[in-house]
Amino acid sequence: MPLERLQASLERWTPGRARPADPLAAISAAWPSIVGPAVAAHSAPLEISGNALVIATRSSAWSQQLQFLSVAILKGIGAAALERPIERLTFRSGLLRTSARSAASGPAARGRERAPGAEPEEACDLEDALERLRRRVSSLRRRAPAHCAHCGAPLELAGDRVCAPCTGAAENARALQVERLVYLAPWLEPGEMREQLPGLSAAEFERARRSLLQRWWLVLERARRAGKLSASGLERHVASSYVLLQSRLSPDRVTPAVARNLLGPELEALLWPHAADKAKGGDSSKNESR
């Protein structure tokens, strides 16, 4: 058989009729362009059942999101000119959970790791955000040079022993202890206070004293402006503490005159009306004797 030139063979060739493609395969191939790459990463066509396309999704949130996009998805599928038209969509949640997570940790995902300083991609849903957070925390724990002695959180410096939240919690607890001691016995000498609370410094004491004085005066001033006390009578306890903190006297050395000088006659009359009346009566009798 004589050989024929290739050019002559190509001139006689005409494309034949293509074999009908599998509808599901055609939809799967076009899926990223139909729904977009971000949505396609968390969903996939699963099967065709009658005139319905069954779509597997990673979570119920993704199923709901695709439900909102049903009209656009059906329109995109219709453009594929399938022999059997797809008229509706159904969803099966959770089927892509394992594959999506393995893909997120695979080589392709590692190749998409953001550069330092780059803005992170927005999470697709709450589950995706939590999964990212878990991976980030796990990565930080593995790479951390040290861990918090209290909660085990990763630390940036090898010499650190406690994280900032635990440090803050310890400082708040210490401040509360100091305030409680200052509130109960502000007249104690520094040495006596250190017996009750080891390591107490003069600065700690003064800081707690000023804090309590400021808070107590706000309570008393509010009562003075209102012209009445609360139903619990809290203001009387606050006033007693205020006088002790200001005077630094023990309770047995605080006289009505000391309280009146520190609180003023208006607050004294509001807090202890009988004592104020008695004091006024004593002053008037002294004036009459004169």
Image: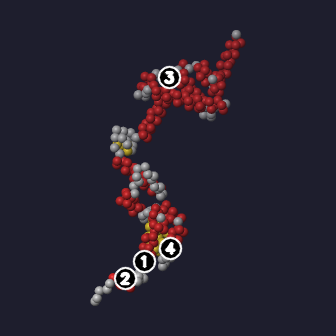
User: Label 2 neighbourhood size at 10 Å, few (<14), some (14-19), many (20+)?
Assistant: few
Q: CA distance from mark 2 to mark 4?
A: 32 Å
Disc 2 + disc 4, Cβ < 8 Å: no
- Which type of secondary structure does the marked residue at label 2 adopt? helix
Residue at (56% x, 26% y) in the render: 242
- Counting residues from the N terminus, which is met first, the one under dot 1 or under dot 3? 1
- Which type of secondary structure does the marked residue at label 4 adopt? loop
Task: State the residue lying farthest toward the top.
Answer: 290
Q: CA distance from mark 3 to mark 4?
A: 87 Å
Instruction: From this view, report whether residue 90 is shown above or below residue 129.
Output: below
Residue 234 percent across, percent down from the top left: 59, 32
Which residue is label 4 attached to? 79
- Counting residues from the N terminus, which is met first, the one under dot 3 or under dot 4? 4
Instruction: From this view, report whether residue 75 is shown above or below residue 7.
Output: above
Disc 2 + disc 3, Cβ < 8 Å: no
Residue at (45% x, 72% y) in the render: 27
User: Which one is nearer the viewer's eye here, 80 or 208?
Assistant: 80
- Which type of secondary structure does the marked residue at label 1 adopt? loop
Give the quarter of the figure containing the N terminus: bottom left
Task: State the residue lying farthest toward the right.
Answer: 288
Residue 5 percent across, percent down from the top left: 32, 84
Which residue is label 3 attached to? 187
Amino acid type, residue under disc 3 in the picture:
Trp
Amino acid type, residue under disc 4 in the picture:
Ala
